[in-house]
Image (cartoon, rainbow, N blue to C red):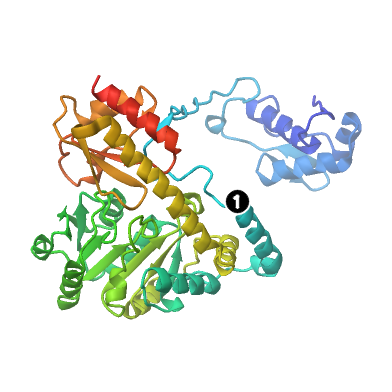
Amino acid sequence: MFVLNHKNQVPLYTQLYNQIKEQILSGTLASGSKLPSVRELAVELCTSRNTVESSYQELYAEGYLYSRPRSGYFVSALHQDALPLSQLHKPRLRDPLPELPTPCMYDFHPARLDRESFPASLWRKCFLDSLRDNSPELSQYGDPQGEWGLRCNIQKYLERSRGVLCAPEQIVICSGLQHSIDIVAHMLKEKHRVAAVENPGYFLPRSVLRNHAFKVIPVPVGSCGLDLDMLKNSGSSIAYVTPSHQFPLGYVMPVANRLALIEWAESGGNLILEDDYDSELRYQGKPIPSLQGLRPGGNVIYLGTFSKILSPALRMSYLVLPRWLLSTYRRLFHDYFCSVSLLEQRTLAEFMEQGHWERHVRRMRTLYKKKHDSLLRAVERHFGRRAVIVGQGAGLHVVLQLTEKHQLDERELISRAQSSGIRLFPFSVTYAGDEPDSSRFLLGFGAMTSPEIEQGIELLFKLWYP
């Protein structure tokens, strides 16, 4: 007996399908049993024949029923060991959902942006304009390297603001830094097996390169950037660097060292991966010109992103490849499709074309400079001589260097802060190898207001030095 509920939001044919399937699985309808004809069951249930026919056809397609010419539908023979437990008679057990992260009042994570910074109204307008103007093209695949209009706008911007000299055909649109490095690793692993990374440095490139079976060599970083003598002795043929704002220490590589690094690359057939992740956010003087601009035709792969200024949720980044590497890229990826939404690429191109991007960059530089300065004042006011700031003047974070070794280690200090609503990012994860002492801490300031920064630093000091 089947019962249909006409007030239920589940379609009638689905209700009937579920009930017949359940009776077959539970053994109520034995194999070989003949089901009522479509007409008879439709009359019995006071429903249309199409409803019954749709249910029967779905069960037939899935193998629960079979048909005989002029005889109707019959229940298929199913192996009893393969039958699942009845889902109608036995409640389904569900794994509990994971708990949400504990909310924090003061978030000092180094990669958080201002909560009100995304230009939603302008983005919405550009999005709708792109949707209206490009709707016929949304039924097609886009350019594998990324939309030409977006690449042209990126090329113009990079030349003006970063001194990067390239053509649009050298640019590849990617879905974040992880994807960018993944593409580079695919291209280089045929001829290169050892890669040097900054230590301390960003942990993501280490992981991606190791996942491609590269041997990763940590090279120490000083106030002048990567230690070039140790790089030369490391056996590496690839060097991943953040020369304009070293992560996490914030050092700027002097031009003499930049030229020496370029010479290392070109004299031995080596390659530089230049990650210019937050170059727009410089609060003292002009932005530092890129390595790539010093030797446009050299062995430098330039990596950029929109995550630090616009939004990490968009997953939009780009590569600038040397011309001699384009043939390798096209050979390996000619069958691939671009992993970034065509509509969002067109939206960003429109956003840049209308001048919104550069105005947004200027606004964000002003906004984050105020927060940066608020953090410096708060640390000086509350920590005094107990701490100094390393790497100020750029980006979305600074390093808090305790002048005396604390009696608690890094984990205990972070735990104490977390218990009072302060989120800190462990400095130790920036090291490849043994964890350092607990004297350094990353302090991001992007997500908080100036009053919140002041309150958070005051509370942090009281927790660490009660």
Give the residue at mark 1: 120
Q: Residue 139 is drawn in which quadrant?
A: bottom right
- Residue drawn at (19%, 72%) of the image: 259
What kind of element bears circle 1?
Answer: helix
Counting from the top left corner in percent of width and height, residue 400 is at 25, 39
Q: Position of residue 267 (x, y in %)?
A: 15, 77
Q: Quadrant of the C terminus?
A: top left
Q: Position of residue 178 (x, y in %)?
A: 37, 55
Q: Is residue 218 left or right of residue 203?
A: left
Nearer-the-camera pick, 319 or 458: 458
In this rendering, would 196 be left or right of 275?
A: left
- Quarter of the image with the N terminus is top right
**Residue type highlighted by circle 1:** Ala
Residue 24 in which image quadrant: top right
Looking at the picture, how far across and down is residue 218, in whole percent? 17, 53
Can you say whether 175 is above or below 373 in the image?
A: below
Vertical placement of 456 versus 336: above or below?
A: above
**Residue 384 shows up from this direction:** yes
Seen from the viewer's position, the closer of residues 107 and 43 is 107
User: Is residue 189 something that shows in the picture?
Assistant: no
